[in-house]
Image (tube, rainbow, N blue to C red):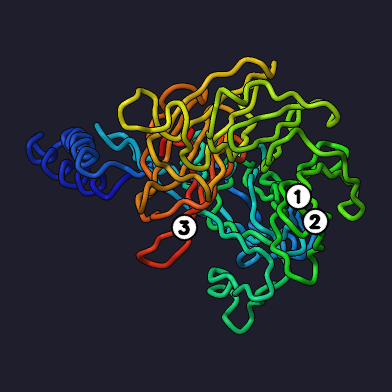
Amino acid sequence: MSSGGQVVGGLVGAVAGFFLGGGTPSGALYGAQIGMTLGGYLDPPKGPTVNGPRLNDLSVQTSTYGAVTVNGNVFWLENNRLKETVTKKKSGGKGGGRKTTTRTYTYSANFAVGLCQGPIVGVRRIWVGPDLIYDAGSSDPDTLAASNAAASGFQLYLGTDTQAPDARMQATLGVANTPAWRGLAYLVFYDLALERYANNLAGAQVRVEVVQLGVVGGPENVAMYALPSLNSHYGPVWDGSKWVGIILLHTTGDRLVTSTDMTSWTVSDPFPNRVWHSIEYFNGVYVILAAGSVATSVNLLSWNVPWSPQFGSWKFGWIVPGNGGFLLVEKEQGSGIHAGDGVSPGDGVRTVFLAANLTTWNYGWLAPYVNLSNSQPAWNGAVFLAGGNIGATPVLYLSSTGLGAWSPVTVPAGVTHIYGMCAFGSAFLLIGYDQGLNLGKAAISTDNGSS
């Protein structure tokens, strides 16, 4: 097809060639050819339009529960159609060649996927087709960054009785016509690109790992059990078959108690002559603590008290299984060797690591006068984390072994008091308090407590 420039150039060239060629027809012919060529440079002819692959039908079967085969049920699709985006790209046109326009079609969708009856706590992982797009439980920084980026493309509704309607659905259906789907946990995806999924929702099957644990109960669904003593008691701990605890029976001394149902308890003979106040079970070994003593047993009948005189009046308070053994930690600084006189090396609140053979031990230390009374240290599979306060100053310490000097780490901003910590997987959860704002604070570390 000739362009306008070629037509005009041919007419002008023919007239000029007729006169320059002595008024002959051949002059007009040559002039027309030259004029068309020059006109083509100025206005190249338009070539064919090349259309890329395109769907003939953008509609999807009416969105109802189970209408699309996904692990989560698609119950709403914006306008019941996929969204088509057309991108145009022109090429050619130089040197008199024809221009070519290429149209590329891409498809996306705004849709809602029902998960299950709510309320739920949240979701841990989300797959679209074969792709894991969201993993809240990962400890890898790159995966967490990618998950945070992906989270901007969807909205989770937990299925509560008070959840509000989705804003995107309201914009399409109208505020008055959009239900909140209360009691249904669901996800709404915004502009999900479908190129990787064969440009259809069937290829973008959604699978979700739903978190339903962590429901907060009240008096109506929490059973209360009591140990068989009105005086001090510690534990109980679960050993795989029964609960084991320590009680002070009247004033006659400590007793061991066991139960399989938390209702009926068996009271054993007295312990070795100490005031025991902590108990832990790990890998077939029971460990109990007194102020300056530790005892171990594998059967709850015979107890080994290996090196009580070594520790004098150390104020052991916490038992933390980890690193293949047990870490014993003072709640506050006691007396005796390395008691924190400010001069001796290794002074301060002390830790003792008891190896799995129950005979090998060594000690470590935090700073002097750390108070760990409110927060049991934790082990995440790689390091121990301990936290408390020195006076009004919150402090945190790390150690991979529990031996030698522990390393101080920065306390999360806004935390003035540390009241608890635990490990879940490789991460740490810390619970604190902001005295200035009178608010509780929670912080998570995914880099072994460093930040």
Check whether the beta carbons of the residues at disc 2 and disc 1 lie within 8 A of each other. yes
Name the residue type under label 3. Answer: Lys
Q: Which residue is mark 1?
A: 248
Q: Which residue is mark 3?
A: 441
Disc 3 secondary structure class: strand
Name the residue type under label 1. Answer: Leu
Q: Position of residue 324 (x, y in %)?
A: 65, 21
The residue at the point 86 percent across, 52 percent down is 262
- Front-lying residue, 345 or 249: 249
The residue at the point 79 percent across, 54 percent down is 250
- Front-lying residue, 367 or 185: 367
Q: Residues within 10 Å of mark 2 (few under 14, many from 20)?
A: few
Q: Position of residue 135 (x, y in %)?
A: 59, 42
The residue at the point 18 percent across, 42 percent down is 14
User: Of marks 2 and 1, which one's residue comes earlier in the chain?
Assistant: 2
Q: Which residue is mark 2?
A: 229
* Residue 404 image-quadrant placement: top left
Q: Position of residue 276 (x, y in %)?
A: 69, 40
Q: CA distance from mark 2 to mark 1?
A: 7 Å
User: Of marks 1 and 3, which one's residue comes earlier in the chain?
Assistant: 1
Which of discs 3 and 2 lies nearer the camera? The answer is 2
The residue at the point 59 percent across, 24 percent down is 309
Disc 2 secondary structure class: loop
Which of discs 1 and 3 lies nearer the camera? The answer is 1
Name the residue type under label 2. Answer: Ser
